[in-house]
Image: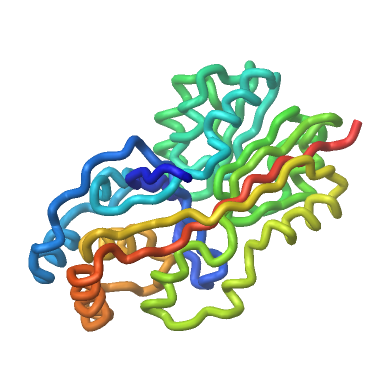
Amino acid sequence: MLQLKPFPLLLKYPPYTNIHKVVVACHILHSMSLHTTTQRSFEELVAESESVSVAGWDFSWLEGRATEQRPSWGYSREMGERMAKAKAALDIQTGGGEVLASVPKLPPLTVATESWPPNIEKATQLLHPLGVAVIADEDAPPLPFGNNAFDLVVSRHPVTTWWEEIARVLRPGGTYFSQHVGPASVFELVEYFLGPQPEARLSRDPKDAKVAAEAAGLEVIDLRLESLRTEFHDIGAVIYFLRKVIWMVPGFTVDKYRDKLRALHEQIQTEGPFVAQTTRFLIEARKPL
């Protein structure tokens, strides 16, 4: 049984207009007791969640108001173990650098890329003191590195994965280790507001990632998918989440969706937390010698 943890989410990407590009990166901290918000009025919760800043990628405001199960494999721990053995490592789409900064022992050469200016600034401030170079990159090929540059490439919740570029910058025998957002992640919430998204539900299939990795000449040595229970315990948490993760429901505002939000508030009040399924898959691929 996977353990429930509170958010906060560590999300890192700018808005995308197509729902199939939804990427939600969820780094889960230690479990905390739930706030007693269930009896508060709709208007009070709306006012509170609209007044709080959604700048940056700190999701601590959701602690006690939303929970999500942690994937069983422990990506940060496993990534840290691989980093300790590497000589040169690349973290693609590092976001604010939070996950990379948590690594106990970084390789002698460690580089991170990021495309979104607010995250580039944050990652630079966080990672430069650790000796990590942060490169502003558009997250489109080619990667700004030479062939065979790294023995380890990692990425947590990449928007897109350029497998041929990953294969090019990996040294023979090097590995790519990543946790990806899986298919139809948190789509119960997305479809509550937007209606059915049948085509989008088919994207981000781990089997497709395996095919693409192998087509680029990599050998997939590990591939695991998990569906994880996510709960929103009050409508304020839903509003905050959608204000912050603005590509989940493009153009979201409280005024635009007030009727649906009020109905969802009443549902949570009477039936309990709104439950969605977050999906994650782990993939590890090696470049042949």
Residue name at image x 40 percent, y 41 percent: 28
Residue name at image x 57 percent, y 20 percent: 106
Question: Measured along the vertical axis of the image, is residue 83 above or below residue 166?
Answer: above
38 relative to 94 in the view: left or right = left
The front one of 152 and 73 is: 73
Colouring rule applied to residues: rainbow
108 relative to 3 in the view: left or right = right
Residue name at image x 16 percent, y 49 percent: 35
Q: Is residue 16 visible?
A: yes
Residue 211: image x %, image y %?
80, 57
Residue 126: image x %, image y %?
41, 29
Count every numbered label the image shows and give the total. 0
Q: Residue 86: which quarter of the image? A: top right
- Residue lying farthest to the front in this orientation: 1
Residue 270: image x %, image y %?
19, 72
Residue name at image x 24 percent, y 70 percent: 271
Q: Which image quarter is the C terminus in?
A: top right
Question: Measured along the vertical axis of the image, is residue 173 above or below residue 199?
Answer: above
Question: Measured along the vertical axis of the image, is residue 195 above or below residue 98?
Answer: below
Q: Residue 91: which quarter of the image? A: top right
Q: Is residue 136 visible?
A: no
The front one of 69 and 82 is: 69
39 relative to 199 in the view: left or right = left
Residue 257: image x %, image y %?
27, 79
Question: Measured along the vertical axis of the image, is residue 34 above or below residue 31?
Answer: below
- Residue lying farthest to the right in this orientation: 289
The front one of 122 and 195 is: 195
